[in-house]
Structure formats: C-alpha cells, structure tokens
Image (spheres, helix red, strand yellow):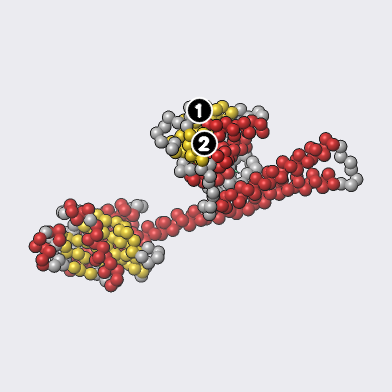
Amino acid sequence: MKSSDHSLEYRFWQNAVHEKDWKDALDFLLASLRKEMVFDNLAIYIIDENGQKSDIAYARAIGREKDAEADANWGEEIADKAIEKKEIVLEVPNEEKSIEKRVNSTYLIGLPLTASGKLIGAFSLVRFGGPEYTQEDINTASLASVVIAYVFEKKALQESIIELEKVQRQMRLQDDFVSTISHELRTPLGFIKGYSTTLLRDDTEWDEETSREFLTIIDEETDHLTELIENILESARLESQTLDMNFQPLRLDLLIRDVITRVNARYEKFEIIFNSDCEQIIQGDNTRLAQVFENLFSNAVKYAPNSKVEILIQSNLDDFIQVTFTDSGVGISEEHLPFIFDRFYRVPDQPKKAGTGLGLFICKRIIEAHHGKIWAESEDKKGTSFIIQLPAR
Ligand code: ADP
C-alpha cells in the first residue's frame, strides 16, 4: 500500500462510520480508494434475503472509457465468480481482444463481501488496458471490501430499525384500537340495552310519545353500531387490498352537492360554503367517493364544531381535479399530521370525541384506488384543510 497502512485504514473507515447515507459513505470510500490504486469502474452486488444476487447495488465509472461507463455488465461475471468461490478472483484479458480495442482489454478483480461471517455479495473493479493488479493493489482492494461490507451491514441494520419502529407503532395503535373499539361498541350497546329493557318493563306503561323517543334512540344507536362494524370490516378488507371498485363516469361537483344535501338534512346548523368551476366528467366509484366526503364531513362535525366548512373544486389544473375541504376547527399539530391517515391513528392531544381512527385510512385507500392523492394541511387550533386530487381523465 502506498500510504502507511494505518492512515489508509483510517481514511477508509472514517467516512464509512460517520456518513449517515450509505451512498455518501461509498462515494468517499471510492475517492480514497482511487488515490491508492488505479481503476476505471467499480460495481457492488448484494445478495438479497432469498439468497439471490440482486441488481447492481452501487456502480461508479471513473471513466476512461465512455462506452464502458454505459454498460455495468462488465463487473457481473467476475462478481458472480467471487460469490461462488468466496475468494478474490482475478482476470486478465485474452490476447486477441486486447489488440482490437482498449475497452475489451479488461483487467478485472472480484472480491467477496462478508459481514458478520456471512457472504453478503461481491464487488468488482475494472482497469481498461491494464496494467495488471499488483499484490499491493489486491491488499488495498481487500481492505476496501471490508469497509464496503460494513457499510451494507449498517444499511441493512438501519432499514431493520425503521421497519421495527413501524411495526412497534402499528402494535401500539392496535392496542389503543382494542380499548377504543370496546368503548365504541359498548356505548351504543349500552343505550340499546338500556332503552329496550326500559320499554319492556312490566310495571310501567309508556305513552306513545315517550315510546317513540326511546325507539328512535335505539334505531339511531343501531345505525351507529352498524356503521362502526362496517368501518372495521372495511378497513380489514382494505388492508388486504380486496376492495371492489365500480368505476363509472361521474361529475364530482354533483356528487359533492348530494353529500352536502344529506349533511344539511342531518346537521341543520352546519354552515357549508361550496364553490366549483368544474363540470367535468371523471371515472370514479360513486358510493366510495361519497363515502370519502361523508367521512370528511363527519370529522368536521367532531373536530370543528361550530365552524363553517368551505369546499372548493378546481378543474383548471394540469391533469387533475382538486378538491379542498377546509374547516376552522381544533387543527392538527405538526408532529401528528404525518400519521392521521394511518389505520387506527387518533391525535392524542385533541378533545375526546367518539371515533376509531379508521375514517381517514379508508378515505386514503379509496382515493388511491382512484389513482389520486389525499393529504392534510393544518395549523394547530386554527383549522385543517384536506386536499384531494383525482385524475381528470
Ligand atoms: P376518527 O375520527 O374515527 O378518530 P379518522 O381516521 O377519521 O378517525 O381521523 C383520524 C384522526 O385525525 C382523528 O382521530 C382526529 O384526531 C384527526 N382529525 C381528523 N379530521 C380532523 C379535523 N377535521 N380536524 C382536526 N383533527 C382531525
């Protein structure tokens, strides 16, 4: 090795350890390696969890040959050999080819990558037109292979941590969900049981008006219960991606007007301002899209009581129609905003309202099934806007 072994080792390792991004770490390593030995291209192949060699994981052409830069295949064969033999493999060009063109005169070195005693892939270097690799070059490349294996092991570890955090969050949500759902189911059941037992009492005669009032409560609570159970089943179906969609030509402005009429009938005092410049026909599932807006309204009733809701449809955008649904309710703080579309997620620091954390999850899945997007923008204590974009054609 040209520099003193220790300083080379130090330079190889320092960025691999400190760089957060694995590609940056490899870029630095490549630059350090290039100072130590001559090569034109470098390629790294990693074995995936099924034991198959993946596509190229990282490749850089330092580029004395532009043709070769475009074609990373040169490294694949030697990497395969290094993986198969689990040892360093060298290849020099055959005589005939090398006379024709320098790019055909490839001096290759393939090195297996091992992390924690396990073969994880291989990396290869190529020199167009030689000279042959010296023992010193081979030693330097071996040292680089240790660092590369470390970088990929660290990358795999970081990915596992992210995955684990996701699973943990999901488990916490499931736990919360069980307690929420038992509460949510018990409340209407309690009403139904209470009022029906009261009506059935032998020792009391109920006048017509009171009986009707009690039966209305039972009727409403049964609807509530049905809706809740449907939401739970629907979210389970959506989780396993088996939602049937019935796409038909429809007008979004008319669909939303229908929903508004229903909402107005139910909540008389709810003020809704509706503006639309859109008479365009799109492909969509009428019932499902109505469900999305009904959900947004039922949230506005809960989280923005006494606030007016403004709905704007814009069709003068490139390839999509945009619906903005704005309330001036409790809002959602920044830290919770990224999660509100997750299954079971409920913002913890809001006033307690009945709910399961399934509504927005269902909305998102329905919009995505329409190849659209939905997201929220919000300012804590000021209000929330839900923005939906659906493809115009
Ligand atoms: P649910 O209302 O049943 O809890 P959703 O999935 O519809 O479930 O909503 C998830 C969470 O997002 C709610 O629990 C609430 O914390 C928050 N949220 C939804 N809509 C609004 C809104 N308009 N304003 C403020 N917070 C909202």
- Lower position in the chain sequence, tag 1 or tag 2: 2
Residue drawn at x 29%, y 56% is: 58
Which residue corresponds to mark 2?
A: 250
The percent coordinates of residue 236 (x first, y second) are: 57, 52
Image quadrant assignment for residue 212? top right
The kind of residue tagged 1 is: Ser
Extreme-right residue of the structure: 203
Q: Secondary structure at mark 2?
A: strand
Residue 198 relative to residue 363: left or right? right
Relative to 329, residue 365 above or below? below
Q: CA distance from mark 1 to mark 2?
A: 15 Å
Which residue corresponds to mark 1?
A: 276
Q: Secondary structure at mark 1?
A: strand
Residue 325 relative to residue 124: left or right? right
Image quadrant assignment for residue 300? top right
Beta carbon of the mark 2 residue lies under 8 A of ligand 1: no
| Disc 1 crowd, CA 10 A, few/some/many (<14, 14-19, 20+) | some
Relative to 42, residue 216 above or below? above
* Residue 30 in view here: no
